[in-house]
Image (cartoon, helix red, strand yellow):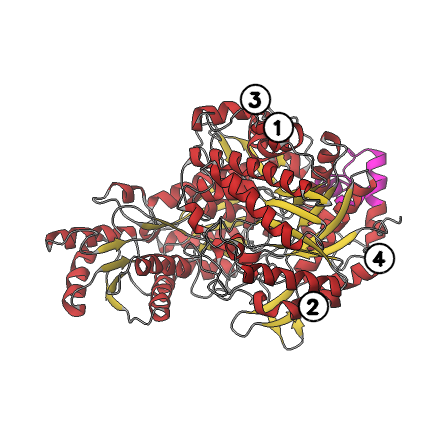
Amino acid sequence: MSRTRFPEDFVWGTSTSAYQVEGANGEDGRGPSIWDSFSDSGAACDHYHRYPDDVRLMKDLGVGAYRFSVSWPRVLPEGAGRVNPAGLDFYDKLVDELLDAGIKPYVTLYHWDLPQALEERGGWPERDTAYRFADYAQVVHDRLGDRVGTWLTLNEPWVAAFIGHAAGIHAPGRKSAADAFTAAHHMLLGHGLAARALRAAGAAEVGVALNLAPVLTPGQVTGSGKRLSEEDAEAVDRIDQLMHGQFLEPMLRGRYPERLLEIVDRTAGLGHVRDGDLEIIAQPIDLLGVNYYAPCVVQAQPGEPADLAYPGSENILFTTVPTAVTAMGWAIVPSALTLLLGRLSRDYPDLNLMITENGADFADTVTGDGVHDADRVSFIEEHLRALLTAVEQGAKVRGYLVWSLLDCHEWADGYQRRFGLVHVDFGTQRRIMKDSALWYRDVIKRGGLGDDRLRRPTLETVAARARVSRATVSRVVNGEPSVSADARAKVLLAVKELGYVPNAAARSLVTRRTDTIALVLSVPGQRGDALTAAVVHYVTSVLESAGKRITLMLSDTAESHRRIVQHVEAGLVDGVILLPADDTDPLTERLARTDAPIVLLGKPAITSLVPYVDVDNAAGAAAATEHLLRQGRRHIGMVCGPTHLVAVQDRLTGHRDALQRAGLRPHVAPAGLDGESAVAATARLMHDAGRLDAIFASSDELAAGVLRAVEGMGLRVPADLAVVGFGDVAAASWTSPALTTVRVPVAGQAKALARLLLSRLEGRPTTSVVLPASLVVRDSG
């Protein structure tokens, strides 16, 4: 096997999931799932009706495998009992279509779409759900087992349990650490019961797909070689147990790690782990599906509260590294895939592995001659090289399935993400093969990457080829004498093979001029003290961990603007993170004209001016409005802050669009930024619009004013009128009644700012980062 060729029997393919691509959620007897009301996928990719066309696309690509999931509520609308023949008919026809095209079906039984009927009976925290899952697995195998050889029980149970039950970001939207640990155990139990049933029914191969990511400190990712402190080593181990040990150890060794049990016991107790459970969970598996996107980067941080998705993670900061990121803000570190596969092979040497998901979201643009997604091509190519390195080192990796075949509904993020090899116009359902699809077709045809050079060799690519760290490559590029002769020879050979030309970023990785970053703050204003404080805390921590110094600069007068620009133009800092007073702040434009890399908190009026980090204000406002509509509210008004602010404009757009989809017209009253202006706006709104049954406010400060106003009118909240805000400020849970609102990811924005600036300092292509907001339902509506 050459350095660029994979084994002859290597499996090339793609992956999707039912809820993300099928559509037809209300057709042919399908019952509702927990996602239908949480983030409605609508028609999605209409794969339910267009599957023959999509299979032809896969045949044109030359893939040998298609991993898809079966929709549990399409087969068993109530989750148990009555079988829906039409649902099974669809998968029957899909499997036949695949086999006729020479494509092997890989069936995932659970990709997060639990029947709503089972959720109403307790969901995954209820033990009985595990047994209903095994019954469902038997029903599907009875219909498809004569043609499907490989069965994956669960997809990413950590995500389903902790993002869905602890963080509340995914369906079912619970925020209970105890529920999350209990759900995780019952998913494992369901896996074991289903695996046993499938094996008894004659399934050729049974496996599971897990989201796996090396847990590393920033120094480990960048290859500084610095020995871990005792505190950092403990942080890495604790998160590793929560992410990996919680699933790998019971499945493959029939035990939970002791360290994990301590966390579970103090959070949820251990009564849900019964005698005999671990024996059931540890059913032999033939294949472990590895879903890899990015490493998990952490460091010890005394006083840091636990991340909701990681109960028990107190005193640990989830941080970032100086590298390129995808449009999701995920760090691009292909070498971590090599580390991951190497570890799995060492810890579980008899285990067969398969990459069941790997891919990236980038901001694609459709042009007259196609979709030229060079970033995605580079991402996949670099990860395939990292995978090949692991195979050469002995990892038993059977194949690689790209996520995803199609652009699709990305769960809580809706349709704003683009992971597909094939572009989908969700309005017309037109499919266009992107450049990445055509490139992947060529890779499959020749069984590897070919001996040609990478289109855009990067520092990361050289590091993967030479099997050294990025920092080592940079030291060689900069001529540092500290690198061993062997490592230097490997790097120089990789540089020659790849045709790599070091850019300014590579040359400055070690010898950057100042290693100083300006953090420019304005008076908090509409953004609020909490977000400003979080940015200072997290940005400082992340950048300092990357070896940067922080200079805080206050932007509150014209003179301070002049001084800041002079400071930057003089080259006294390497980059700037700017928190402007608002999106019309002239300092943004003045700094954009300098040569220094700039990143901005908040979407500017001119979005092409500088890269920025913001939340999806329109989607958050739409989610709030749709929540009110689901409650039966039909007379909904909005108290709207100053519309010269881009964030307020987007929230107004999201609110109006949601009402328009429901066939309703908006009632809007303008206000300022403070609660007193909201009191007056509410009075005008009630007078002009007549009787309302709900009010959405564009900020929590305005929502608090609405609550005061309606109390003065003698109205009861929420019996007479529901109130929903935006922001989830600290006071939102202390209003009377507690305020239903849209939560803004405060720490997420701060960390994304640091990641984005580090990427710009690296000279990497960067795009703005838009993070999802999530609805927090309390008592006010």
Residue 609: give its label. Answer: none
Q: Quadrant of residue 509?
A: top right
- Residue 369: % across, % down: 67, 76
User: Residue at label 2?
Assistant: 57
Q: Of helix, strand and loop, which one carries label 2?
A: helix
Residue 421 is at least partly visible in this image: no
User: Which amino acid, mark 4?
Assistant: Gly
Residue 450: give its label. Answer: 4
User: Residue at label 3?
Assistant: 258
Q: Quadrant of residue 446?
A: bottom right
Residue 201 is at least partly visible in this image: yes
Q: Which residues are magenta?
A: 464-492
- Asked if the stretch drawn in magenta spans residue 467, the answer is yes
> Is 107 left, or right, of 695 in this rendering?
right
Q: Of helix, strand and loop, which one carries label 3?
A: helix
Residue 487 drawn above or below residue 451: above
Name the residue: 55% across, 67% down. Answer: 46
- Mark closest to the chain's N terminus, 4 or 2: 2
Q: Residue furthest bottom?
A: 368
- Mark closest to the chain's N terminus, 4 or 3: 3
Tell me the CA gap for discs 3 and 1. 17 Å
Tell me the CA gap for discs 3 and 2. 48 Å
User: Which amino acid, mark 2?
Assistant: Leu
- Mark closest to the chain's N terminus, 3 or 1: 3
